Amino acid sequence: MAKTLIAFFSRADENYFGGAMRYVKTGNTEIVAGIMNDLISADTFKIDMKEPYSPVYMTCIDEAKKDLKENARPELTTYIDSIDGYDNIILGYPNYWGTIPMAVATFLGKYDFNGKTIFPFCTNEGSGMGSSERDIKKYAKGADVKKGLSITGSQAANSKDAVKRWFAANGLI
């Protein structure tokens, strides 16, 4: 049986929800990762930045844009020793400027993904997957990157059925 890791980057604090700002204690991507973990047997790893983005949404997006423009690799608080024991990596993140947050690029750059299958999912408020699937292929050389799942962030808590359908379509359940 294939062993699965759910690795995700998520941001709490002030977030954008369909036209309005709202403070949240748990980020949307983390909510979806929790739903996924309830549905399948998987290990989880939260990708955390050593120096997190601002809790203020507008400042955060400016910081994320700067990191993207500079192709930065923010340092993470911790790393997994190895991903060798995993066949499947479910990779979650919010859509930042049409792609993955650069902390996810840091994570992807740390490991050898040859022979691994990556199932990306992203939370957003209407921008979908953007170029993230293509960008993951650049950063995770050798991985088989599957078609991702786009979840509207403000609907993260209600995404169980969409997750189940995506898992079933990809043979994860």
Image (cartoon, helix red, strand yellow):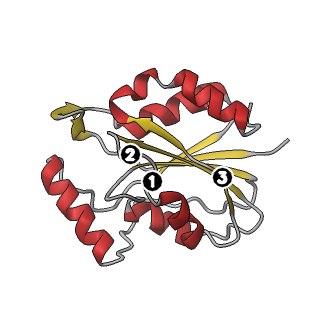
The residue that disc 2 covers is 10
Disc 1 and disc 2: Cα gap in Å? 8 Å
Q: Give the secondary structure at mark 2.
A: loop
- Which of the 4 image quarters holds residue 59? bottom left
Residue 61 visible: yes
Q: Is residue 7 above or below residue 39?
A: below
- Which of the 4 image quarters holds residue 31? top left
The residue that disc 3 covers is 146
CA neighbours of label 3 inside 10 A, class few (<14), some (14 to 19), many (20+): some
Q: Is residue 49 above or below residue 163?
A: below
Instruction: Name the residue at 76% across, 55% down.
Output: 85
Q: Is residue 62 above or below residue 26?
A: below
User: Residue 165's x, y, as percent?
Assistant: 64, 28
Amino acid type, mark 2: Ser
Find out whether the residues at labels 2 and 3 contact each other: C-beta distance under 8 Å: no
Amino acid type, mark 1: Ile
Instruction: Name the residue at 68% across, 30% down.
Output: 40
Indicate which disc, 2 or 3, sits on the residue closer to the N terminus.
Answer: 2
Q: Which mark is residue 47?
A: 1
Q: Is residue 1 left or right of residue 29?
A: right
Indicate which disc, 1 or 2, sits on the residue closer to the N terminus.
Answer: 2
Disc 2 and disc 3: Cα gap in Å? 21 Å
